[in-house]
Image: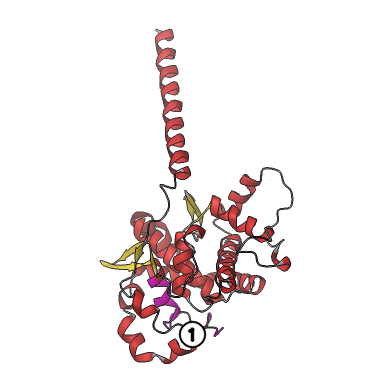
């Protein structure tokens, strides 16, 4: 009887570990084949974004801004109300990262907000149980990590770009050591730890800011400055380095995020926030 019992337990454990192995193998293959990459959509307002490109003109373009920025739905959502409080709690941290990276705080926040709204709308039960009552930011812990949903391979590329002086994303010697580790023991584990601490979002903000700055550098060097194009920067943040191809009239879009039955693109949401009055008292628009 005992032998039969132990055989059952053994078989259960054996098949259980085998199943876990299959799952992890599947995830690994999916990531290697880029099956988890964001495909993205082109925003329906794409032509509008390319009509008026510089910040100063956009701020003065009030009539068309009101016409095209249909931000009432997301601004009045429960997800935004909670997210806004979470962002405010991190104000000092965001300002610190802005100073260290040279990227305006509102630009950093503009790429975080669509990712957080996507997190909240795709995890409704968790949002209602935990994030909405506590008014805290959500942290990704699978495939993508941290509050800005950065993949580990992207995080590594951000780091590599800082060191590679031949890279189009290279920022100069003053930034080469910004993301250095204290030691070289198990860098993968150290990198993951930077993003999975739900109580400290410093590295999520810093990697996001450095990513944005590297994209800025690439486009600037190619003769197409997008330093004042939050919708383009956040689209490329969402889609990844491979999709960053400098050109005169870049597309705006990315992941589709549905908020209260209205669809937004990642880049479109970033634009809507950036030029809204939301949080403008603590993260003002900086004309570059």
Under circle 1, the secondary element is helix
- Report if residue 114 lies within the magenta region: no
Which percent across, then down, holds residue 161?
63, 59
Quickly name the residue at label 1: 55
192 sits to left or right of 41: right
- For this rendering, which residue is in front, 76 or 253? 253
Which percent across, then down, holds residue 118?
39, 61
- For this rendering, which residue is in front, 172 or 125? 172
76 sits to left or right of 104: left
Circle 1 crowding by C-alpha within 10 Å: few under 14, some 14–19, many from 20:
some
As drawn, 32 above or below 271: above
Q: Residue at x 57, y 58 (%)?
A: 199
What's drawn in magenta, residue-wise? Answer: 268-288
As drawn, 271 above or below 242: below
Q: Can residue 12 be seen in this view?
A: yes
As drawn, 276 above or below 263: below
Which residue sits furthest left? 261
Which percent across, then down, holds residue 54?
48, 84
- Report if residue 278 lies within the magenta region: yes
22 sits to left or right of 287: left
The answer to which image quadrant residue 235 occupies is: bottom left
Give the quadrant of the N terminus.
top left
Q: Which residue is drawn at 69% across and 66% down?
A: 175
Which percent across, then down, holds residue 205?
57, 65
**Secondary structure, magenta segment, majority class:** loop
- For this rendering, which residue is in front, 103 or 121? 103
């Amino acid at each position: 009887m005992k032998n039969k019992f132990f055989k059952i337990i053994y078989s259960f454990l054996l098949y259980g570990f085998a199943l876990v192995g299959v799952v992890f193998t599947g995830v690994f293959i999916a990531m290697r084949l880029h099956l988890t990459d964001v495909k993205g959509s082109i925003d329906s307002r794409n032509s509008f974004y390319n009509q008026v490109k510089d910040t100063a003109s956009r701020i003065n373009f009030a009539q068309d801004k009101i016409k095209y920025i249909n931000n009432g739905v997301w601004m009045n959502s429960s997800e935004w109300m909670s997210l806004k409080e979470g962002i405010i709690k991190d104000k000092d941290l965001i300002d610190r990262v802005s100073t260290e990276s040279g990227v305006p705080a509102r630009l950093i926040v503009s790429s975080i907000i669509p990712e957080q709204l996507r997190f909240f709308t795709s995890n409704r039960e968790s949002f209602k149980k935990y994030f909405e009552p506590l008014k805290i930011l959500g942290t990704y812990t699978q495939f993508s990590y941290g509050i800005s949903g950065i993949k580990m391979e992207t995080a590594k590329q951000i780091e590599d770009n800082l060191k590679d002086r031949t890279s189009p994303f290279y920022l100069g010697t003053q930034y080469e050591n910004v993301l250095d580790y204290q030691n070289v023991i198990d860098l993968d584990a150290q990198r993951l730890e930077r993003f999975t601490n739900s109580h400290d979002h410093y590295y999520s903000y810093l990697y996001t800011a450095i990513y944005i700055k590297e994209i800025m550098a690439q486009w600037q060097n190619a003769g197409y400055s997008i330093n004042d194009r939050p919708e383009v920067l956040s689209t490329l943040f969402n889609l990844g380095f491979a999709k960053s191809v400098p050109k005169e009239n870049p597309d705006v879009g990315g992941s589709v995020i549905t908020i209260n039955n209205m669809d937004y693109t990642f880049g479109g949401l970033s634009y809507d926030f950036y030029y809204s009055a939301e949080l403008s008292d603590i993260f003002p628009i900086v004309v570059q």
